Image (cartoon, rainbow, N blue to C red):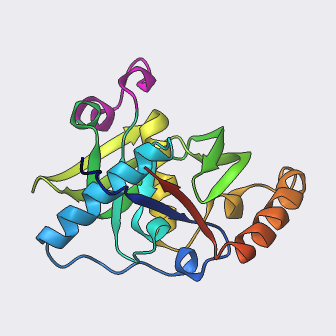
Amino acid sequence: MIFGSKERYVVHTLGDEVLRKKAAPIPAVTPEIRALADRMIRTMRVFDGIGLAAPQIGESLQLVVIEIPPDAMEGNPTPGEALLYPKMPLTLINPRILERSAELAARDEGCLSLPDIFAPVIRPARVVLDTDLITGEHVTLECGGLLGRCIQHELDHLDGVVFSDRVDGKSLPVILPELRRLEKYGARHHYLRVITR
């Protein structure tokens, strides 16, 4: 009997320098980029996430994957939600935000690179996303709800920003002990979370 080899899934945690670098643009969608996107989707699912940016797996590239459950779409969806939810999982190539709404919304956020840490983050309620999809489509769409928030969170990673950087002064002291604990733990484990399946 032949046993298949197990795959190792890795997410880099706070303290790793790769999470603080500005990610490089992707000049072309090659077979290697497609393979990386597939690996990112598998990693996101194994770690029970809804979004993952390439720097979180150690690749400083402008590549993001998102997979939000269909039942998370709120009533009266934005055009981006209506078009993109049926296409999940999404792979965004060189994504950018063109506009941010003046209206703000607060919501608890977590991150695969900051495991077990959650805090409220205030962000624009809607953004205009401009991106290539791995399918070859180019889209420019207004996105709100959980999708709009996830886009902002993941695109922050491409600029070397993690969600705890955006936590306000009132909430930050609450999570500081956890952030310090994560830094200590990360230093001992090379800032890696590993699952083998």
The answer to whether residue 26 is magenta is no
Which of 69 and 139 lies nearest the eye of the viewer? Answer: 69
Q: Is residue 41 above or below residue 188?
A: above
- What residue is shown at x 47% (from left), y 33% (from top)? 145
> Up-down: is 13 above or below 195?
below
Of all residues, the one furthest to the left in this rendering is: 136
Query: In percent of the image, x 33 and y 65: which residue is there?
Result: 63
Tell me residue 111's x, y (percent): 59, 52
Q: Is residue 152 left or right of residue 140?
A: right
**Can residue 66 be seen in this snapshot?**
yes
How many marks overall? Answer: 0
Q: Which residue is drawn at 66% across and 52% down?
A: 115
Q: Quadrant of residue 30?
A: bottom left
Q: Looking at the picture, how far across and down is residue 60, in whole percent? A: 41, 78
Question: Is residue 73 within the magenta segment?
Answer: yes
Q: Quadrant of residue 103?
A: top right
Q: Position of residue 82 (x, y in %)?
A: 27, 29
Region rendered in magenta = 69-83
Q: Nearer the viewer, residue 175 or 77?
A: 175
**The residue positioned farthest toward the front in the image shown:** 1
Work out whether residue 151 can be spotted: no
Please provide percent x and percent y for residue 128. 35, 50
Q: Nearer the viewer, residue 89 or 166?
A: 89
Q: Which residue is drawn at 28% across and 52% down?
A: 4
In the image, is 44 to the left or to the right of 30?
right
